[in-house]
Image (cartoon, coloured by chain):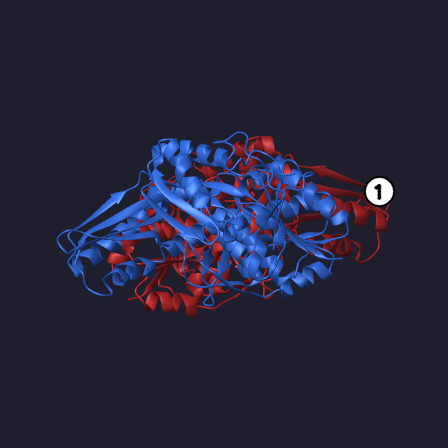
Chain colours: A blue, B red
Amino acid sequence: MGVVVQKFGGSSVADAAKIKAVAQIVLSERRRGHDVVVAVSAMGKTTDNLIKLAREINERPHPREMDMLLATGEQISIACLAMALQAEGCDAVSFTGPQVRMMTDEAHGKAKILQIDDSVLREALDQGKVAIVAGFQGMTPRGEITTLGRGGSDTTAVALAAALKADVCDIYTDVDGVFTTDPRIVPEARKLERISYDECLELAALGAKVLHSRSVEIAKKFRVPLRVRSTFLPASLGTMIVEETPDMEEILVSGVAAQRSEAKINVLGVPDRPGIAGELLGAVADANINVDVILQNVAADGLNDISFTVPRDDLREAYETVQRKAKEIGAREVKVDDKIAKVSIVGVGMRTHSGVAARMFRALAQAGVNIESISTSEIKISCLVAEADLERAVRAVHDEFRLAQALA
Amino acid sequence: MGVVVQKFGGSSVADAAKIKAVAQIVLSERRRGHDVVVAVSAMGKTTDNLIKLAREINERPHPREMDMLLATGEQISIACLAMALQAEGCDAVSFTGPQVRMMTDEAHGKAKILQIDDSVLREALDQGKVAIVAGFQGMTPRGEITTLGRGGSDTTAVALAAALKADVCDIYTDVDGVFTTDPRIVPEARKLERISYDECLELAALGAKVLHSRSVEIAKKFRVPLRVRSTFLPASLGTMIVEETPDMEEILVSGVAAQRSEAKINVLGVPDRPGIAGELLGAVADANINVDVILQNVAADGLNDISFTVPRDDLREAYETVQRKAKEIGAREVKVDDKIAKVSIVGVGMRTHSGVAARMFRALAQAGVNIESISTSEIKISCLVAEADLERAVRAVHDEFRLAQALA
C-alpha cells in the first residue's frame, strides 16, 4: 500500500461545490488502497484578491508581510477540503506548511524548501487519515512564514512525494496533461502521453503553464514519477513525466513553448573592464531575480552594450537594481523593453539529431518573424521575438515539426 | 516609556481605507512616546463568510478544522495593518498567535490562554517596531491552531497587556465606551466615564456587546487598566475600566444589560434522586457549555422539573447532550424555549444598599412585563422575560434608576 500525493490547483478548489468534487477524487484514490497526502492551492482568485488588497494599502508591500498575507489562502483551502472529506465519513486532517515543518530559506515570496520533517504526516497516515497540506508555504528556521512563489503548490506536492517516497505525484489541474503547445494558440495541439523530466523542465522554464520548473527539478532529483491530470476529467491519465528512456530520442521536438512574461533590459555604454558584466548581473542575481538570454555587443566607441531578459514580474526591481549599478560602474544608459516574447522548441531528440535549429529559423523566416536573439541548451532552442509576432511564430514552428500528428 | 496595547475589532479594519485610518491611530500613540502592541480582529464580515463557506461544505464542521479556517481572518488583518504602517514609514511586524507562543488549551473554538511567551514581542519592541498580533487565535502545546471564540481578540489584547505589563489596554471598537444600556433600545443611554472590573464583568457576561467577559476577567486578575474607545472618535477617551474605589458604591446601578442570545432547556419529570441535577448539568459542562439561571421545581408527582439557560449558539449541542442524559436517568421529556431574554441591572452600590431588587421588580410589573425567573449576584440582578418584552423591560428599568441623568 503505497503513498500517493495529489495536488489540486486553485481552479480545482474554486468554490464549495468544486472542493466537494475534489474530495471525491481523493476518496476514489483511497478506495484503491493508497495512503493519500493532498497538497492544495488557494481557492480560485483568492491569491490575486489578497495581492490586490495589499496594493490598496501599500504599493510596495514588504515581502515578509506579503507572505503572512498570502499564506492564508492555502490555509482556507486545506480546512475546507478536510471538512469536505469528513462530511463523506473520511478521516482527514489539515496541516499548514509550518505544521509539517516545511522548512525553507528566508527568501520571502520565492523561498526554497530546505527540508521536510515527514514525522507529522507519517503519524497521520499511520492513523488511517488523509493528510492535507497547504501548498505554496513554508517556514524559516526562525519561525517566519514564507511562500514559495507562484506555482509553489506544485513544488510542495513534489517535495512531499519525495519526502514520503510516494509511488506517484498527481498534479491535478484544469488541463488534461502536457500539450505539444498552448492549445489556445494552436487548436490542433496534441496531448503528450509521456515526456522526460528534462523536456518538462525546459517547457516549464519556458512558460508552459502546466508545471512549475522547481517542482520538476525536485521530481527529477528524487525520481518522483509525476503525472499531470485534469480535475474535471479524472478518468483520463494525463501526461506522465518520467526519467528519459532511449526511445524518447526518436522524437526530434516534443513541444513548442510560448512565453510572454519576459522583459529585456539593455545597459548601453558599459566601460570595457574585465568582470564588469559579472558585476552587473551579479547585482541582479543578488536580488534573487533570474537572468536569461544574455547578450554582449562591443559598440563602435569601445564601450559595450549588455542586454539580458528577466521575468516581467521582476522588471521593476531588476530595473532599479541595474540603474543603481549602472551609475556605479559608469554605464551610459539603461533601457527597458517589455514588449518581447520567447518561442522555444524542446526535445531530447536534439541531443542526437542535427539541423533542428536551422529548420526552426527557416520556419520563422518564412512566417515573416524577425528573431531578436537566440539561446540554446542541449535540448532546447529559444528565439526572442516581438510580442506581436508570438502566436504566428508558435504556429509556424508547431507546423514545421508536424507536432499535431500522433506518432506511429 | 511604557507599553500600550491597542485592540481593533473587525468593523475598525473592515477595508483598506479603514486599515489606513487605524494605522494613523497607532502612529499617534507612538508619537506620544509609547511602545505599541496591536491586536486585531478579522476584517469586517470575514469570519462570518468563512463560517458560511464551511457550512456549505460540511453542516457540522470539525472544530479543529474550523479553527484552522477561522484563524486565517486575523492573519489577513495583521499583515494588512503592518503594510499600512510600513507605508507611513513606521517599522512594524506582524505575528500570528502561534508565532508569539500564545499557548492555549485544546478546546477548539473556545480555547483558553494558558501562557504567553513575551520574548518575541519584547525583541520586536526593543528593535523599535510596532508589533501586530493576530487576535482570537492561539496554539496548543502540540502545535494545533486554536481560536478563543467570539470576542477572543479582546482576550488576546488583555492577555498581551498583562504579559507585557502595559500601562493601558485600549479596546477600540465602533462605540465610544460602555453605556448605561444599549442606545439602540434607550436612545438617552449615557456613556460611563469609569466602571469597575466587576461591573464590567457582569455587563459583559450579560450580553453587553462592548467587551468579552474573559478579557475583563484577565484584566482584573492582572490589574490591567482597560479602556473602551471608538476607532471613529479617537479623540474621545471612552470608558475606563479599573479597580473598584469606595466612591463607586454611591452609584446604585451602573448599567442595564439586555441579552437576547439565551435559550432555556426544561427537563421535565426527573426522578428525585440525590445528585441527579449535578449529573445532568455536569454533562452540559463537560461539553464546555456555560449554564446559567438554574431552577428546580418539585412537581406534584414527586418528580422534579429542572430548567436552565444556555447561550443560544450552544443550544443544539446542549439539547443533544441533555436528551442523551435525560434518557439515561429516566427523565420524562426535554423541552426547549429559545424565545426568552434576560434583563439585568448591575452596580457595585447594591453591595451596600438594599431595596434595589424590589424597585426593579416593581418597575417591570408596572410596565406589564412578566418575570419568568430571577438570578442574582452581589452586584447584579437578572430577570428572565419573554423576548418580546425585552425592550420594554430595559426602558422601564433604565428609567426607574434614572440612568440617563449624569451624576453631580
Residue B86 horizontal side relative to residue A136, left or right: left
B209 horizontally vs A34: left or right: left
The three-letter code of the residue at mark 1 reads: Arg
In this rendering, is residue A371 above or below A126? above
Lateral position of residue B176 relative to residue A349, left or right: left
| Near-viewer residue (A177 or A92) | A177
Q: Label 1 marks which chain's residue?
A: B
Residue A169 visible here: yes
For label 1, the SS is loop
List x then y, in percent, for residue B36.
34, 59
Against A268, residue B220 (above or below) is: below
Q: Residues within 10 Å of mark 1 (few under 14, many from 20)?
A: some
Which residue lies under the disc numbered 1? B332
Q: Is residue B271 left or right of residue A392?
A: right
Q: Nearer the viewer, residue B40 or B371?
A: B40
Residue B81, x across and y down, in percent: 37, 50
In this rendered view, identify the residue nearer to me: B87 or B274.
B87
Q: Quadrant for the N terminus of chain B, please.
A: bottom left
Residue B281 pos. (x, y %): 73, 53
In the displayed image of the protein, which residue is found farthest to the left?
A301
Q: Residue at x 31, y 38 (%)?
A: A339
| Residue B379 on image: x %, y % | 52, 53
- Residue at 84% x, 42% y is B332
Q: Is residue B139 in sight in this rendering?
A: no
Number of on-image labels: 1
Closer to the camera in the image, A340 or B232: A340
